[in-house]
Structures are given as structure tokens and as C-alpha cells.
Amino acid sequence: MAARDEAHWRERGLEIRRRWRTALEDVERLEGESAELRRRFYAADDPYVRDNQIKPEWDRLLAGLDQARRTLEAAPRELD
């Protein structure tokens, strides 16, 4: 039974580390995409394109970035 418990916790730790790594990669990727959308937003001359196409996409991306950052911050606490 002790071996099963150890195996369970090893698997749980591995799962948390994988989630942590994915969140780190997501944060890096989303920060780059956010910078690009910010550039496009401020460079857009057409208010329709800026407000109805770029801004909603940027908002969704920022929400995803926020979630990835929360996951990234929570992972070390979960490992403890």
C-alpha cells in the first residue's frame, strides 16, 4: 500500500510540473501575442477594425494570459 501511495504522489507531482511548464509556455506565448495586438490596435486607422476586430481579440487574449499567470503562480504552492 505504501508503494501505491508513493506512486500516486509521484504522478501527482509530475502532473503539477507539466501544468506549470505549460502555463510558463502559455504566458511567454501570450505575452508576445498581446504585444503584437497592442501594436496593431494603436496602429489601426479604421475605428471599426480597431474596436470591433482587434480589441475583442486582445481582450480574450488578456483573459487567457491572466489565467495562465494564475496557474503559473499556483503550481509551486501545489507542489508543497
Image: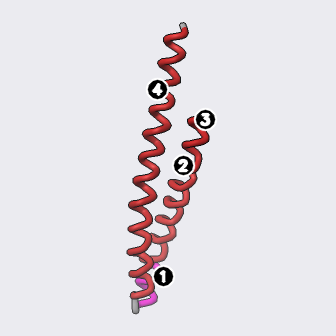
Q: Specify few, some or many for label 2: CA neighbours under 10 Å numbering under 14, 14-19, or 20 or more.
A: some
> Residue visible at 55% across and 60% down?
66
Q: Amino acid at mark 3?
A: Asp
Compare marks 1 and 4 and give the one earlier in the sequence: 4
Compare marks 1 and 3 and give the one earlier in the sequence: 1
Pointer 4 residue: 11
Pointer 1 residue: 51
Pointer 3 residue: 80
Kindly report the distance in space between the C-alpha atoms of the residues bearing marks 3 and 4: 14 Å
For label 4, the SS is helix
Compare marks 2 and 1 and give the one earlier in the sequence: 1
Q: Specify few, some or many for label 4: CA neighbours under 10 Å numbering under 14, 14-19, or 20 or more.
A: few
Q: Main secondary structure of the magenta part?
A: helix
For label 1, the SS is helix
Magenta residue check for 51: yes
Quadrant the N terminus occupies: top right
Pointer 2 residue: 71
What are the residue bounds of the magenta stretch? 46-53
Q: Nearer the viewer, mark 1 or mark 4?
A: 4
Kindly report the distance in space between the C-alpha atoms of the residues bearing marks 1 and 4: 46 Å
Q: Is residue 37 left or right of residue 2?
A: left
